[in-house]
Amino acid sequence: MRQVDERIIISGPVYEILETLADVLNFSYLLRPPTDKEWGQEMNGVWNGMTGQLQRREVDLVAADLSVHEDRIAVMDFVMPPIMYSYVDVMYKKVDDDVSRWLLLAKPFKLEVFLVVFLCGFLFQIVYRITLIGIEVGLSKYGYCYEMLWFTVATMLKQDLSMTHPKLTSKSCGSKVLIASWWLFLIVMVSIYSANLTAGLSVTKQKPPFSNLMELVERKDYTLGMPIEGVNYDLFKTSPRKDVRKAWARMKKENETNPFIMSTDYNAHYRRVQTDKHAVFMYSHQIKTYTDEDCRLAALGDKISWQQSAFGVPLQSPLKDDLENAMSYLVASGILQKIFERRKNHRYHNRTCEVQGLVEAITTEDLLGAIVVVCGGVALSVFTLVLEVLIPRLNI
């Protein structure tokens, strides 16, 4: 429900459910929004918002997704079955895991994998040298290691092996089998490395900045927001979970100087999460709507509290039985589910997450690692050239 000028415009699945009930039970209705625009909180035994309207019998039906709570049951009745089930979770923005882009060349493999490849190469040289026993290689120990290094590099880069020493050419069956196995090993390793490197260059890897609610609460660089209203305040205050109570105490304190913390403007919190270090408590279905629009956003997955949402009527209302029979019919016939699925499909049709470039453009920052390798290779090449020129002249 939103107000434009002096008109009230109603839309969404709750409105469609109300219209369906009106058709099934053949009734008309007059909307009377609460003057305080609240869902309902208890203050000294008196409820405000829509719950207060039911308590004072100012309305016959509250057509809204009111959270079912034992305190509300004392002053109103809920129309069962519920129209939806959801839970309170935390929405946040993931951070880029590839901050050190110049190390991207090393990220496809963990350190232990590089060590395994190095160890295998070292063992290969030893075993291959054994297979050449009885064959005159004509190379010094250092020359043999040098040629074997070029042999390994050439194989990994899929280059012609004619650069290696001709006397290292395989002549025995044992050495041929060994080389074939080594080639197969290198082909597999290079393929895996190339695939992971391609993925790392083209897709931004993002990770959660915290793994649970307690870590979030202890992060002073993050602000917490709570636009949800009504009984959730009581649920947070009386929660048996230490992290939830700590989050509530922090939000209450910060809200004294920054009223935005508990502002009920969901879209404002959504924009703050996108631009700042801000995490917000929301219902799961609302988080789903926002994460479908922005792939950088995610839910923490820490289900703070489960909620049943249902329409409400005054205590001992004569309309309750008829409304519950009609609601049961909507659930059993699948009409209620189709209403939510239709809204869901409409939302998915307009979402930008699927068309946001899953493949990111490669920047110069992504190529820093390759540039460092090339510059290091050029420097080492120049240094080697200088040594090759100076050593003969100095008779070293």
Image: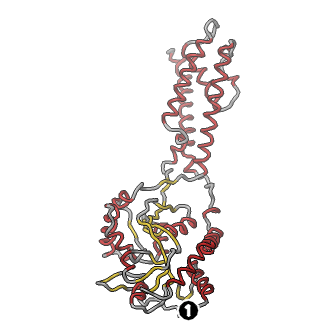
Q: Quadrant of residue 40?
A: bottom left
User: Mark 1: which amino acid?
Assistant: Tyr
Coloring applied to the structure? secondary structure
Residue 384, compared with residue 103, is above or below; it is: above
Give me the residue at 56% from left, 78% from top: 327
Task: Give x and y (percent) for residue 320.
Answer: 49, 84
Q: Is residue 114 left or right of residue 151?
A: left
Provide the residue designation for mark 1. 29
SS at mark 1? loop
Task: Give x and y (percent) for residue 7.
Answer: 55, 92
Q: Nearer the viewer, residue 61 or 216?
A: 61
Give me the residue at 56% from left, 49% from top: 366
Q: Quadrant of residue 330?
A: bottom right
The mark total stands at: 1
Give me the residue at 55% from left, 25% from top: 120
Give me the residue at 61% from left, 8% from top: 133
Task: Give x and y (percent) for residue 379.
Answer: 53, 34
Crowd class of label 1 (few under 14; some 14 to 19; many from 20; radius 10 Å): few
Q: Nearer the viewer, residue 395 or 104?
A: 104
Q: Is residue 253 left or right of residue 358?
A: left
Q: Is residue 186 left or right of residue 217?
A: right
Task: Give x and y (percent) for residue 204.
Answer: 56, 53
Q: Quadrant of residue 212?
A: bottom left
